[in-house]
Image (tube, rainbow, N blue to C red):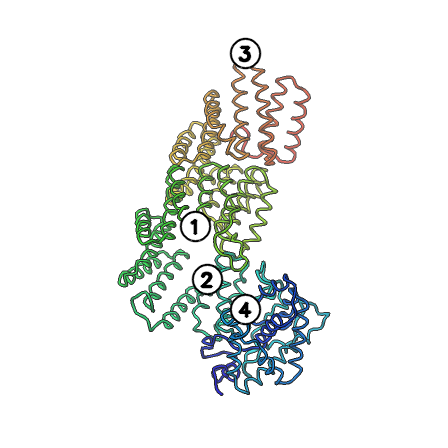
Amino acid sequence: MASVHESLYFNPMMTNGVVHANIFGIKDWVTPYKISVLALLYEMITSKPMALLERRRLNKLILPLQQGPDLTLKQFLMIVELCCPETSFELRCRLYQMADGELKDMEHFFSTLPNPFSDSEVYKTSVVGLFMRHMLLAYNKLSFSQVFKLYKSLQQYCNKDRWVTPSSGPQAELPSAANEDMELTSTEDTSVPRVDGVDREEPDAGPLHQSELCGHDTTGPLSQKQAEYFFARQAYLLKNDENKAMTPAILQNELNNILKFNPDFAEAHYLSYLNSMRVQDIYIATHSLLHYFDRLILSGGEGKSNGDEGYGRSLRYAILNLATLHCRFGHYQQADLALQEAIRIAQEANDHVCLQHCLSWLYTVEHMRGSDSVVLTEDSVKMASHFCLPYLASLGIQSLVQRGATQGMTANKLLDALRSTDMVHWKQSLSELIEISLAQTTSIWRMYGKSTMAWQQAQLLLNMNSLEPVNFGVQQNNTEAFAVALCHLAELHADQGLYGAVTDIMAHLKQQFPPHTQHAKLWMLCDLKIQFERAMNDGKYHLAEPHVTAIAALHRTEGLYRKALLLKALNRTSEASKILQRLQQLCEKNKSTEMIIRVLLATAELHWDSSGFATALPLLLQALTLSRQHNLQSLASETVLHLAFTQLMLGTPEQALALLEDVLESILAHGSLMDKGRALLLMARCQVALASSAVEEDRLAALEQAVETLEEATAYFSRLDCSERLREIYYLQARLHHALGHTAQRNKFAMLLRLLDQELPLSGATALTHI
């Protein structure tokens, strides 16, 4: 009796282990592993009543055991033993008895299986019932030679477990003879290394079911259901929790192994495309994407050419996906050409959904090119709303909010727009867009200098329960939105001198986003910036220099800015000035207002050291105008501090103190410890300057007030371990206590100043020419 199952054992189309015919058309076939699963189901149905907790654990195993790849008997029994040791022992005995007996024992086992059409325990449409029906039908279609071959495979399958000695432990390696799980043909390629869960380094992190403890590597051909389960699981993990998915190299090897048996499996090519995007491999990504749509078009060739079905629709989305691929790699011209082609085909087919996707990517490409894409974005939002596409409409609104934030729109307008989209997100249960919205709100508040509100929004995101159904134990904390929120929290903690908390956050980020993942650059850049600031605050410029190189590799603009800050601190004024000029031109081209303001402030500080304080005023006024136009409160306060310091150095302490008092409340409420300390230090210097012209009584009172202000500033700088600022404070405190006649206090601060000078020699930037 010939059947399709015969090709699995005597396949003339297979050479060197490669199947040249499509075997994935078969939904399922009988293997020794499937016989083991059937034996487990039989024990669960016919055995004596077991504890409720044990039965519940076994019930949770049924679906992944049926859909997952074939396991060795040792792995299978170990999983069952974790749930119910008694059932595992009975199962082992039954399988060994069947393997040690004769062929009629296996025949008797299949004849005694419950009938899904008559047995009440196994309903015909249940998961167990369908599985048993498929196995019984597949077994009944086998010829005698195939049944004999299956029995021999079952014997080999059971003997492999006996070859492992008890002392070898769960991580012991199997002998080379055990590498053949189920022989498909005598010419099977044995050069492909087998990776079983028994000898893996560690199980998959955070499995939902115990069957995943033994790994998810595939060996040999999978049935269609097994392959679909494998693809769905890995694709879901790549989207939501990349850290729990297979590593890029292992996943690619598994996909190559699957494609070796069936090159026409379209889903395998698409998963290969997603995997290649993780490592930024454009060659394999393009190759896999094209192959995916080639197979998809061939499989749907009988459909309409230009309708919603068939290869016409596949062709449109194939070109659209190719455009997104080029956009991700920065090939904007190729992306634009592909988008124009996709738009043309979609217009011919009257496919409005595809046109809206094309329009959303078109404004994305224009934005990445540096062009003004506001009109395209607004058109996309209107059309997406008209065709009831809330996802695309919300993405467009979020893009407009981001553009509005950089162009200086007020916070109330931006947050109103986000609130209107959040209502749609909650109604439609678009959890991904809710996360993006909260992360975007965090960034907006941080940009506007409202650190308390940014802190609150970040915590709200991290403590939010996801609306998306979690199928594989994913906790929805490995998306880009969560990475952005955690990076903001790390920087906010660093601003407050809580470096212990920063270390914990960074350790969590490194664990959740390993270096090979696509969002790892976010925490890498954040960590380097924090380390650079710490080294600069401590005056250890030799430690800050390697961080500059690393930052430049991840972000060119940030790298140039911090290089200029380092050169300025080392008193290499001319080199720093050239870099700042180049950086300002680059930022004006990219319309990066925040960085332009920072560059203007750094350039003004260079003018303090070289051409004088008066020449810095135009730069500071320009920076103040930009920061107020764009509602950047934090940068505006910092600019006012620079203006106040300039006024103080020009001999007008009254104006300096007036400017300082205007922004002091905002700095103390939302500023970092560095900003608070600098503001109080500057206020103390203004108070000392004003005291010199006052009468004796008022002068002593002003000096006492300055001492109190310096003590508060000392507390801020001490938490940051800022040696440069502490040296200046110790000097001023010693002078003030000397003027007040406090000899003991004067000697104390003089000693602290000397110790600090011995530990850290004075740099080129003196205390009189920096704020």
Residue at left 39%, top 37%?
Answer: 412
Which mark sits nearer the N-terminus, 3 or 4? Answer: 4
Disc 4: which residue: 68
Which mark sits nearer the N-terminus, 4 or 1? Answer: 4
Which mark sits nearer the N-terminus, 1 or 3? Answer: 1
Disc 2: which residue: 274
Disc 3: which residue: 695
Instruction: Tell me the crowding category of disc 1: few under 14, some 14 to 19, or many 20 or more residues within 10 angstroms, Cα based.
Output: many
Which mark sits nearer the N-terminus, 1 or 2? Answer: 2
Residue at left 53%, top 75%?
Answer: 118
- Give the spatial CA distance, label 1 vs label 2: 21 Å
Q: What's the amino acid at mark 4?
A: Gly
Which is nearer the eye, 540 or 707? Answer: 707
- Give the spatial CA distance, label 2 vs label 3: 76 Å
Which is nearer the eye, 646 or 638? Answer: 638
Which is nearer the eye, 448 or 750? Answer: 448
- Give the spatial CA distance, label 3 vs label 4: 88 Å
Q: Is residue 279 left or right of residue 389?
A: right
